[in-house]
Image: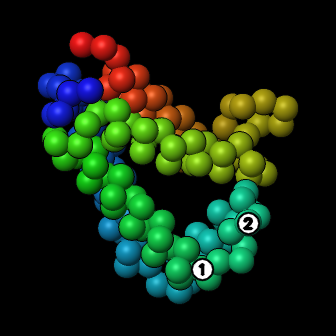
Amino acid sequence: MSLFARFHQWPARIATGAFILNSGLTKAKADREAAEGLHGFASGAYPFLKEQDPQRFTATLSKAEIAIGAALLAPFVPTAVAGAALTGFAGGLVGLYLKTPGMREEGGIRPTEQGIPLAKDFWLLGIGATLLLDGLRKK
């Protein structure tokens, strides 16, 4: 593993890092109503989250997104580490897409109009897996 991100990895790291960092910073300012909506949506796909307080859930999610976004943007975070974090996070988002009714056309994986915003998480999963594999390959 290289100590610093390689030049060809920067477009993917900057694009995804900035996107996720912004999302986390936005969630950090969420009011009770926004936190309840986000929590309700997430707990519909992941029932174990129902036990969590909506504001605490949103604050934890915000911190996780900020950490992942910062890891992707920080050149000293090894690519395999940043890629693994992005892959894990995006996997959870893809699960949200796959488990939430109305996001996909019946009997398939293609998104409905409501599912298009979540379908982009497959791109994040692909970018994360690419970074992870690139970071793990022998130089």
User: In the image, 17: left or right of 33?
Assistant: left
**Tag count:** 2
Give the vertical position of 114 relative to 1 (above or below). Answer: below
Where is residue 52, by image quadrant? bottom right
Where is residue 98, by image quadrant? top right
Res 54 label: 1
Image quadrant in which the N terminus is located: top left
Q: Nearer the viewer, residue 75 or 8?
A: 75
Q: Position of residue 60 (x, y in %)?
A: 47, 71
Q: Which residue is mark 2?
A: 48
Q: Position of residue 135 (x, y in %)?
A: 32, 26
Mark 1: which secondary structure?
A: helix
Q: Position of residue 86 (x, y in %)?
A: 42, 42
User: In the image, 28: left or right of 8?
Assistant: right
Mark 2: which secondary structure?
A: helix
Residue at 42 percent of width and 45 percent of height: 85
Residue type at mark 1: give it.
Answer: Pro
* Residue 15 seen in this snapshot: no
By what rule are the colours in the image chosen?
rainbow
User: In the image, 74: left or right of 86?
Assistant: left
Residue type at mark 2: give it.
Answer: Phe
Q: Residue furthest right?
A: 107
Residue at 29 percent of width and 33 percent of height: 79
Give the vertical position of 90 relative to 52 (above or below). Answer: above
Instruction: Categorize mark 1 by other alpha carbons within 10 Å: few (<14), some (14-19), many (20+).
Output: many
